[in-house]
Amino acid sequence: MYNELEIRGQSNVVGKDIPNIVGGFGPGKRSMLAQDIAEFHGKPLKFVNQNINRNKNRFKKYVDIIDLTEEDFVVTLSNHGILSQNSVNRSKNIYLLSQRGYAKLIKIFNDDLSWEMYDRLLDAYFDIKDEEFNPLDRLELYVQQRRRKEQQLAEFNTDLSNGSSQASELIETF
């Protein structure tokens, strides 16, 4: 298992911005969160997670899938504004899938739209090379991440002023 996750900005794939998550499955290997897969396929995250859980025996841990709630990776995603601390606290599972794991999930979905999206994602996300990110792209991605962090901070302040019980938990993330 490779313990390092890197967030290398974002990519616009099929009209949606997703984080470029590299590592976890090996140096330089791209991966994708189940929540992003759900969004691409127009399916609820609950549906995606249920399909993974029902077919867990088909996914090899650290080869196809990693449950981030069982690992230290969540901190990386939370620190980059990809997951909020609230979503981490609420989630039973936060799945990260390798390209191979994603292919297995598509086989489980087994509908025409899923296969079409699979082809598009392979072309637009998993085949992206790091050299395609120039410094201006990286700067723009940093600004986007910073804006997300500011939005999370504003939500935190709202929760704090409303006396949310989870506000004290959020303090540690900022």
Image (cartoon, grey):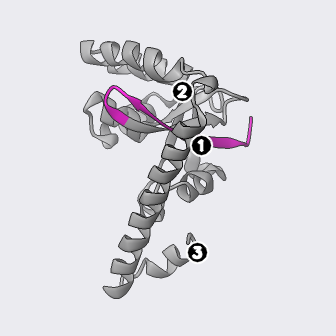
Main secondary-structure element of the magenta-colored stretch: strand
Identified by mark 2, the residue type is: Asn
Q: Can residue 10 be seen by looking at this rendering?
A: yes
Residue of label 1: 7
Q: Earlier in the sequence, mark 2 or mark 3?
A: 2
| Disc ID at residue 130 | none
Query: Which one is in front in this view, the residue at disc 2 or the one at disc 3?
Result: 3
Find numbered disc 3 in the image and state the secondary structure of the residue it sits on.
Answer: loop
**Cα–Cα span, label 3 and label 1:** 21 Å
Q: Is residue 111 above or below residue 92?
A: above
The quarter in which the N terminus is drawn is: top right
Q: What element carries label 1?
A: strand
Q: In this view, does 121 lie to the left or right of 66?
A: left
Q: Magenta stretch?
A: 1-16
Kind of residue at disc 3: Glu
Q: Residue 129 at what x, y percent from top left?
A: 60, 21
